[in-house]
Amino acid sequence: MNTLIILSLLGVITLFAEIFRFRKGLFPLILIGLAAAFAVTVMDYNNPQVYYGMMNFDNYAVIFSCAILVIAFLWFMMAKNYFLQETSVTDHFALILFSLVGAIVMVSFNNLTMLFLGIEILSVSVYVLAASDKSNVMSNESGFKYFLMGSFATGFLLFGITLIYGVTGSFDLTTIQQHLSTSNETGLALAGVLLLLVGLSFKSSLAPFHFWAPDVYEGAPTTVTTYMATVVKTAAFAAFFRLFSNCFAGIAGHWTGVLWWMVVLTLFVGNISAVRQKSLKRMLAYSSVAHAGYIAIAIVSIGAASASAIFYYTFTYSISSISAFTILFIVSRHKGNKDISAFEGMSKANPLLSFAMTVAMLSLAGIPPTAGFFAKYYVFLTAIHNGNTLLVLIAVIAALIGVYYYFRVIIAMYFKPEQQLVPIKVGAMHRIVLIITTILTIFLGLFPDLLLGWL
């Protein structure tokens, strides 16, 4: 709860920064605030607290909250130069901070009303941020499309919550779980569960409810796309697993079959569509869809290790994505081009960017010894232990397709000639972010138990 208070106060202070003219001190203040929020969150580990039956800050919530705060910290460092050029920098920073409040609520809810509030607090902020580049028609389209699709998803979510409440007479997760486990009246409840599944699949970009993601990711400013692919996705899957593993585990046989086919569709749609892309940003958008499929395998295969597998996967995927999007941001600003061709021959003039991008691509592809390999390994291992061997075989085939388009970027950097060998200037903050994310990607691949042991 202290985490929510710190983030909320930080957001309010940010809103007043323009009035009291302390914009220059705002960025370090935010980083200090995020560090303080992380510290108080860590103090709640092994000290579970339930607040009025609405919020449950157990170890699951603490670990995912810490992951979100670390990712947000790195994201602010990555996005500093972009937002400081904006006249409305305080508004942008405030929206991000309030969306973080929504993300923390999503990972710690103990009541369906809090789930809805968390999703809306997060989503409304990101709708605005997606359209924040007012001079770019694609950004305006991105925000509008995201708003419309998000509104439809909210409708499904609310309808599902309504049906669940009608059957159980409660919004409390424990009460719902007990009622569904003991009652034989599952017809209306199953309809509610499936509607919730559809709503959360929209938020998580699982096929066939992924169609908004590529256009929104491509049109939004690269920094905002990075936030959506990391913090938003982490919060969405943490909420997804918390709800379905606690509330609906007793009737898992009724919804896991549906999610199984959605995972298969997501894996192939995401990976095959990514192969066809020339734009690196759009390729990473479809890649994000594919990774949603890998993460969802652990939800289909609910077991003792599922929470750890999801946590490790979302965190390591986010770290690699921040690295990849940071380099895309730097290169596209320098060359005015977001295509893979912009990276041709880059290794000769820009070895740091090339090495960091290579590590990020290898991790996203799941190549050892990067963290991405063990992320897939633990998800697959969880699925095998819970009888989903066929799903793992399908996922391995999909992963082989993914290797092809990730290696296209590496081949472009190291094996294709560049028209002009011009070194790209990398700012100090971006350099720090790339060093941290690259080291973490390799280090967590060599020592994965450092993360897996917490849940």
Image (cartoon, rainbow, N blue to C red):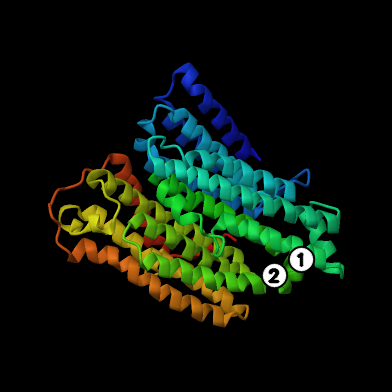
Residue appearing at x 44%, y 18% in the figure = 21
- 411 with respect to 79 (left or right): left
Q: Earlier in the sequence, mark 2 or mark 1?
A: 1
Residue appearing at x 33%, y 57% in the figure = 280
Quadrant of res 401? bottom left
Please tell me how crowded label 2 is: few (under 14), some (14-19), or many (20+) other residues with Cα within 10 Å: some
Q: As rendered, which of 442 and 390 lies closer to the eye?
A: 390
Please tell me how crowded label 1 is: few (under 14), some (14-19), or many (20+) other residues with Cα within 10 Å: many
- Whether residue 445 is visible to the viewer of this picture, yes or no, is yes
Question: Which part of the image, by quadrant, shows the N terminus?
Answer: top right
Give percent across and percent down for residue 135. Answer: 38, 35
Up the image or down, 455 lies above or below 88; here it is below
Asked whether the beta carbons under mark 2 and mark 1 sit within 8 Å of each other, the answer is yes
Q: Which residue is under mark 2? A: 255
Q: Amino acid at mark 1?
A: Leu
Q: Amino acid at mark 2?
A: Trp
Give percent across and percent down for residue 404. Answer: 33, 71
- Whether residue 43 is visible to the viewer of this picture, yes or no, is no
Q: Which residue is under mark 1? A: 190
| Helix, strand or loop at mark 1 | helix
Up the image or down, 112 lies above or below 402; here it is above
Up the image or down, 83 lies above or below 168; here it is above
Q: As rendered, which of 347 and 205 lies closer to the eye?
A: 205
Give percent across and percent down for residue 418. Answer: 15, 57
- 107 with respect to 26 (left or right): right
| Helix, strand or loop at mark 2 | helix
Residue appearing at x 57%, y 79% in the figure = 384
